[in-house]
């Protein structure tokens, strides 16, 4: 056997340089595109010298922070769809432990990266060496043991010859699609410099193949039968589609069968958003089209997704049977799925063969188009630039408007990059990818500080595609030093910093779960002086070309210039920390405290428990037709309720929920053919066709197919049906239909069921100037009914809707009436909001609320005042 005398570190780097991985096109590429290094006493003498010797075949890059340079390595592997990777090395001690967070990020996201931290002396001569952690009970422990739970494979190299076993095992992990992830080889610093006679054959160049197993034949047959019998199938595209190179296969399969495709964070851009079957993102940050289809799908085919609850809504939305294609059995069996354990591309090809004659129905295709069009309108509305003259210096843009501006300025082949804070959720919903693999979001670990370093990794992976990096001020402050690295290396990306003066995303979540504004925004944190940070100047000090813009128009122009210019470009814009896109979304399980002295927290906790109970009872079989107040999640005020995202019953509130005696209200978003009915109770009912078309019946009375307006903002009165108490009724959607169900106690049947047509309720203008609003009396007190009053109000943006302030919490006719009221808000554009204030004389009740679209407000006691910002508003 021919041998060569090398140090352990030299053998390591020579082996790494000789490894190659087969690419999707059949070519071979170096397995390791380079090594990121920050040297210290634990790696400079041994590994540092070895890297210098291999610098032509295995380039070394210098970072400024161990965690962030590891992020650069991981983002490279992610953008390369796991077909190439990088290694990262540090000294022992804090340099090594700085990389543990990055290892966890790679572990969660199933991304390959090789960690090479220096370690203590194997022979323990200088024990304890500088930066060594001493364990009083175990002499074998070092700080690097922290890597064990966040790596797929860990090995401490205490002898040079151990590499003969450890390195092939490492490569096998990287090239096993079911097991791939981070590996840590902990390099004892004395052993790095020790020599050994290594076999020359060990360094022979080798091309590693990534296996592509097909799902089991019997399971494929079972899956094919389920899909062939499906009436409302849905396909979920996860990251596995991209990592198996199945983009082309998926595009053809979806186009041929017509099955709609919803995308996870990792799967987004597996198909461009322009593909005819793409229905948008899924889950808590999902599009309404995708989530509605998920909630009503009878068969769901998941391709390459680990079905994380937040990014798919899998525990709240799915009620149909599951089929799962995944290389990892652990993921394939989730939700009691028919598990097709195999490569996404190969297994999808086999399933396509089994479904050669399958295509969705024309009715289902029409429904998909309708939902796609509606969602597209929502996206255009929330991402549009403010109208000329409507944005003033005191109005800050929303994140969605920022996304719209950057998206319009971006080339079709651009790659968008992000990780944490507000932007990933908004980008998942709103960003329109022009080409495959144009969306790079680290949302498995959602690690703040990933963004800037990822800009480097993405550019290194795809130097011919411009990449646009989004980071909030919180993420930027947390980890920004690799800007200097990017400038030094000649990297190109455009970084958009949205400055909302704190952690805006968590501030909104804090409010939504009943918490006080505390320790998130600068203004709500302990301070003697509020920070006033010039992010553009800070970025410029590291060599970036940086500018701060004042509005959306400037942002769009500046991003377009920055992309054309190349290099490291930074664009800063102040944003409003308050609004987020209300459209879309699904229930998010965030637990409010069981014990709190804060007013209103008890109702928030109670609503959460009811919602969680429904979820537990129903498991994965939540019935989208069942709408109960038990499922709601209250906001900070116990007078306000969010919609049940992704379910057909958006709202359902009873007198018991509201804490009063009479009024109930519900809103239902029905898909084609869906039935809503009631056998009749002690309540009289007014059914309002908010939009769409539906067939209404009551007992033997057939009101026929009623075609209503397209939108509540059409300035056309709605159709309605009045029903006395103890009267059965049913509504079946034709294409799609939004139905409001208004209830109050009935006393007689003298009035009889009747259809109320738009010509019976003309629009009435009330007020002048900024008090102008348009009232449609659907069921006024002058029309036959026992106790119901139903009114729709259209209020132009910027106007008051209830001026002057008034109240009706006292039964003192004719001076004042005692009324219970619900306000269901629809706002155009959806990112607008309404300001509610309700208070009583002694201010024991005094609340101000920013109400977004689809929220429900109820009110009985106190004086009420409403103003409307940034939007036209409709109330029913």
Image (cartoon, grey):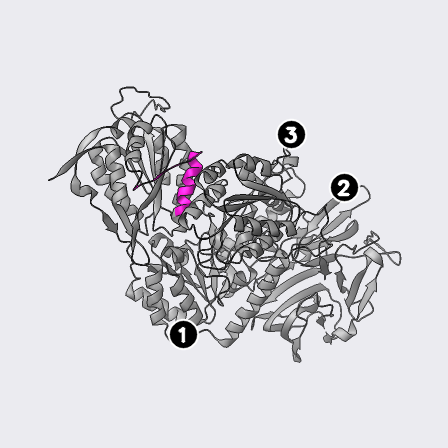
Q: Quadrant of the N terminus?
A: top left
Q: Which residues are magenta?
A: 57-76
Which residue occupies the extreme left position in the image? 1
Look at mark 1 in the image and give the residue it sits on: 358
437 versus 839 height, above or below: below
Q: Position of residue 467 (x, y in %)?
A: 49, 50
Asked if the stretch drawn in magenta spans residue 73, the answer is: yes
Query: Dot 1 lies on which element?
Result: loop
Residue contact between numbered discs 2 and 3, judged by CB atoms under 8 Å: no
The mark total stands at 3
Asked if the stretch drawn in magenta spans residue 693, the answer is: no
Give the foreground label among 1 and 3: 3
Look at mark 3 in the image and give the residue it sits on: 527
Query: Dot 3 lies on which element?
Result: loop
Question: Residue 333 sits in which quadrant?
Answer: bottom left
Instruction: Compare marks 1 and 2 and give the one earlier in the sequence.
Output: 1
| Relative depth, front residue between 207 and 817 | 207
Residue at (40%, 49%) from the top-left corner? 461
> Gap in Å between the C-alphas at discs 1 and 3?
64 Å
Look at mark 2 in the image and give the residue it sits on: 844
| Relative depth, front residue between 631 and 479 | 479
Question: Residue 325 sits in which quadrant?
Answer: bottom left
Residue at (66%, 76%) from the top-left corner? 706
């Amino acid at each position: 056997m021919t041998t060569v005398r090398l140090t352990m570190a030299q053998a390591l780097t020579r082996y790494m340089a000789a490894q190659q991985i087969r690419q999707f096109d059949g070519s071979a590429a170096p397995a390791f595109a380079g090594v990121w290094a920050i040297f210290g006493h634990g790696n400079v003498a041994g590994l540092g010298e070895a890297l210098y010797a291999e610098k032509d075949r295995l380039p070394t890059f210098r970072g400024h922070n161990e965690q962030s340079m590891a992020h650069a390595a991981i983002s490279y592997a992610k953008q390369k769809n796991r077909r190439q990777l990088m290694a990262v090395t540090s000294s022992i001690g804090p340099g090594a432990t700085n990389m543990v967070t990055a290892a966890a990020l790679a572990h969660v996201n199933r991304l390959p990266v090789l960690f090479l931290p220096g370690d203590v002396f194997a022979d323990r001569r200088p024990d304890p060496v500088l930066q060594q952690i001493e364990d009083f009970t175990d002499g074998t422990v070092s700080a690097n043991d922290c890597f064990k739970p966040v790596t797929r494979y860990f090995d401490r190299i205490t002898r040079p010859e151990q590499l003969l076993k450890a390195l092939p095992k490492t490569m096998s992990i990287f090239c096993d699609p079911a097991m791939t992830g981070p590996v840590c080889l902990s390099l004892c610093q004395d052993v790095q410099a020790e020599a050994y006679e290594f076999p020359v054959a060990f360094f022979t160049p080798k091309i590693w193949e990534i296996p592509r197993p097909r799902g089991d034949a019997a399971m494929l047959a079972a899956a094919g039968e389920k899909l062939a019998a499906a009436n409302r199938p849905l396909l979920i595209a996860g990251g596995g589609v991209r990592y198996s190179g199945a983009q082309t296969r998926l595009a053809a399969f979806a186009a041929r069968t017509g099955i709609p495709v919803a995308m996870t964070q990792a799967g987004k851009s597996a198909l461009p958003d322009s593909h005819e079957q793409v229905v948008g993102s899924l889950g808590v940050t999902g599009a309404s089209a995708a989530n509605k289809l998920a909630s009503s799908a009878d068969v769901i085919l998941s391709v390459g997704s680990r079905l994380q609850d937040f990014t798919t809504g899998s525990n709240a939305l799915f009620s149909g049977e599951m089929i799962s294609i995944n290389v990892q059995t652990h993921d394939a069996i989730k939700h009691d799925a028919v598990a097709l354990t195999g490569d996404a591309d190969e297994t999808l090809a086999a399933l396509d063969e089994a479904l050669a004659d399958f295509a969705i129905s024309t009715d289902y295709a029409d429904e998909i188009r309708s939902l796609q069009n509606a969602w597209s309108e929502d996206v255009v509305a929330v991402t549009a630039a403010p109208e000329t003259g409507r944005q003033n210096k005191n109005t800050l843009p929303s994140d969605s408007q920022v996304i719209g501006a950057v998206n319009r300025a971006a080339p079709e082949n651009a790659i968008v990059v992000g990780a944490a804070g507000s932007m990933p959720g908004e980008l998942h919903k709103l960003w329109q990818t022009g080409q495959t693999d144009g969306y790079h979001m680290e949302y498995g670990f959602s690690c703040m500080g990933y963004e800037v370093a990822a800009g480097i990794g993405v550019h290194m992976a795809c130097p011919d595609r411009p990449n646009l990096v989004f980071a909030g001020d919180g993420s930027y402050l947390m980890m920004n030093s690799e800007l200097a690295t990017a400038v030094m290396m000649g990297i190109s990306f455009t970084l958009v910093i949205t400055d909302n003066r704190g952690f805006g995303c968590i501030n909104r979540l804090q409010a939504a779960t009943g918490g006080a504004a505390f320790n998130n925004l600068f203004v709500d944190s302990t301070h003697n002086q509020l920070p006033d940070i010039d992010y553009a100047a800070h970025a410029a000090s590291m060599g970036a070309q940086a500018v701060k813009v004042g509005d959306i128009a400037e942002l769009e122009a500046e991003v377009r210039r920055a992309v054309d210019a190349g290099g490291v470009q930074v664009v800063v814009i102040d944003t409003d920390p308050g609004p987020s896109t209300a459209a879309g979304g699904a229930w998010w399980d965030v637990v409010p405290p069981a014990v709190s002295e804060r007013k209103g927290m008890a109702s928030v906790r109670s609503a959460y428990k009811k919602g969680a109970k429904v979820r537990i009872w129903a498991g994965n079989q939540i019935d989208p037709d069942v709408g109960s107040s038990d499922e709601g999640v209250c906001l900070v005020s116990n007078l306000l309720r969010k919609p049940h995202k992704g379910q057909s019953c958006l709202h359902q509130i009873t007198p018991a929920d509201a804490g009063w005696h009479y009024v109930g209200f519900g809103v239902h978003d029905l898909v084609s053919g869906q039935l809503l009915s009631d056998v009749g109770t002690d309540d009289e009912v007014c059914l309002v066709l908010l939009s769409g078309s539906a067939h209404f019946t009551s007992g033997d009375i057939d009101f026929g197919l009623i075609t209503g307006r397209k939108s509540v903002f059409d300035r056309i009165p709605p159709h309605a049906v009045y029903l006395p108490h103890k009267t059965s009724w049913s509504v079946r959607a034709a294409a799609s239909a939004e139905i409001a169900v208004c209830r109050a106690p009935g006393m007689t049947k003298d009035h009889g069921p009747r259809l109320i047509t738009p010509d019976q309720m003309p629009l009435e203008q009330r007020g002048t100037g900024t008090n102008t609003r348009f009232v449609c009396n659907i069921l006024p007190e002058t029309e036959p009914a026992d106790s119901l009053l139903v009114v729709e109000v259209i209020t132009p943006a910027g106007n008051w809707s209830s001026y002057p302030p008034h109240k009706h919490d006292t039964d003192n006719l004719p001076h004042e009436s005692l009324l219970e009221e619900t306000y269901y808000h629809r706002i155009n554009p959806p990112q607008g909001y309404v300001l509610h204030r309700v208070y009583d004389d002694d201010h024991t009740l005094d609340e101000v609320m920013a109400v977004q679209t689809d929220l429900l407000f109820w009110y009985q006691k106190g004086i009420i005042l409403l103003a409307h910002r940034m939007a036209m508003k409709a109330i029913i």
